[in-house]
Amino acid sequence: MLQRLIFRVWVFFDSLKILQINQMMIKKLNHIALAAAILIFISCNEQKSAGPPSEKTNIKSTETIKTVTSKTFGRAFNFMIVSDWGWNGFKHQQEVADQMAKTSDSVGAKFIATCGDNFQISGIASTEDPLWMANYESVYKGISLQVEWFPVLGNHDYKGNSQAEIDYSKISRRWCMRDRYYTFSKKINDSISARFIFLDTPPLVTEYQKKPLDYPDVVKQDTAKEMNWLKEVLAGSKEQWIMVFGHHPVYSASQKHGNTPELIKRVKPLFEKYHVQFYFCGHDHDFQHLHEKGKNIEYIVTGTGGETRPASTNDLSVFSRSEPGFSVVSLKGDSLNVTFVGIKGNIIYSFARSYK
């Protein structure tokens, strides 16, 4: 590729001779061509030497250009996560949705979790809002996507009628938003079970509490009640796996939003006390895996269901990438695998760990 590019530069400047440009000008242009070729060569070498973000953990991880197939996870309990996806089919939403259908068909996804901003910009008006068709039903129409969807609310959902997203569960067979926060457990095999906990994070963020005109439903929520509920659920959980889903990150290296101080203060201590292994979120439009040294929990940002933003890293970063896609979570016995998948079915990043 480099040779072809340099050749084209030389051909372009050599063709000027046909136009009978004087020899002095040709000589100068030849010098320019040589300089351009040298710059191209240096640039290509720099790009070639640039590697992926450093991985600062001993967790087994891989980065490959392989694609997800029916044999990728073998016999396992698989589900998918997509977040920040509500763009009415625009941005990369439709491309992500189409690949989700293919991947779900390959891995046999049991359900789909979403980490909020289901309806970008201003949420929805009601259960009869045309956006349900334009943004959800007609976009995620693949047969393999007709499984249960377990959503949470994002800050953009709170700009509209947030209760309508809960009420839609009474209309749709697959939209299963039981409440603003809820939980259930699933049996993985004869000896392993998983607890899934879905949080309502926007009311926990001070910024939205101060803007009742922009987020009318936020100020109506009792955050102390939600925190007591979370503590009771975690304290009573006997499952080997405990996974929590919310819109806002606890930790994030993104320059757009980054860490959420309110969650670090109120939610993180409960996660650590009751041995939560995974927290999945969106809000920042990139893929991230973060891990705090000496702690048991993995922080996963998977907010690339429609629009992406530049990724960055910090001291907690294990992996970071900006690319449209979604995540596949695969449970098999005492091992859990998280895989970031791109719009071509490519495996962007994958890692596994045990529940202990």
Image (cartoon, rainbow, N blue to C red):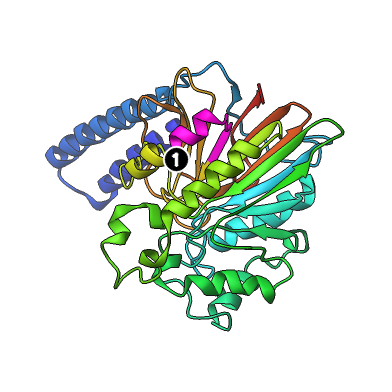
Residue 104 position (above or below residue 121): above
Where in the figure is residue 289, as x and y percent of width and height? 50, 33
Q: Is residue 340 in sight in this rendering?
A: no
User: Which quadrant would residue 296 be assigned to in this image?
Assistant: top right
Q: At 77% across and 58% down in the image, what residue appears?
A: 144
Where in the figure is residue 249, as x and y percent of width and height? 43, 43
Q: At 57% across and 33% down in the image, what residue appears?
A: 276
| 14 with respect to 145 (left or right) | left
Identify the residue under disc 1.
Answer: 267
In front of the other: 336 or 100: 336
Where in the figure is residue 135, as x and y percent of width and height? 56, 71
Q: Is residue 275 magenta?
A: yes
Quadrant where the image shows the C terminus: top right
In front of the other: 18 or 335: 335
| 295 with respect to 336 (left or right) | left
User: Which quadrant would residue 164 be assigned to in this image?
Assistant: bottom right
In front of the other: 171 or 15: 171
User: Which quadrant would residue 41 be assigned to in this image?
Assistant: top left
Q: At 40% across and 57% down in the image, what residue appears?
A: 203
Q: Is residue 131 in sight in this rendering?
A: yes
Q: At 32% across and 45% down in the image, what residue appears?
A: 12
Where in the figure is residue 56, as x and y percent of width and height? 46, 19
Residue 50 position (above or below residue 83): above
Q: Is residue 140 magenta?
A: no
Q: Which residues are magenta?
A: 267-279
Residue 180 position (above or below residue 227): below
Circle 1 packing at 10 Å, graded few (<14), some (14-19), many (20+), is some
| 80 with respect to 21 (left or right) | right
| 121 with respect to 149 (left or right) | left
Which amino acid type is marked by label 1?
Val
**How many discs mark residues in the rendered view?**
1
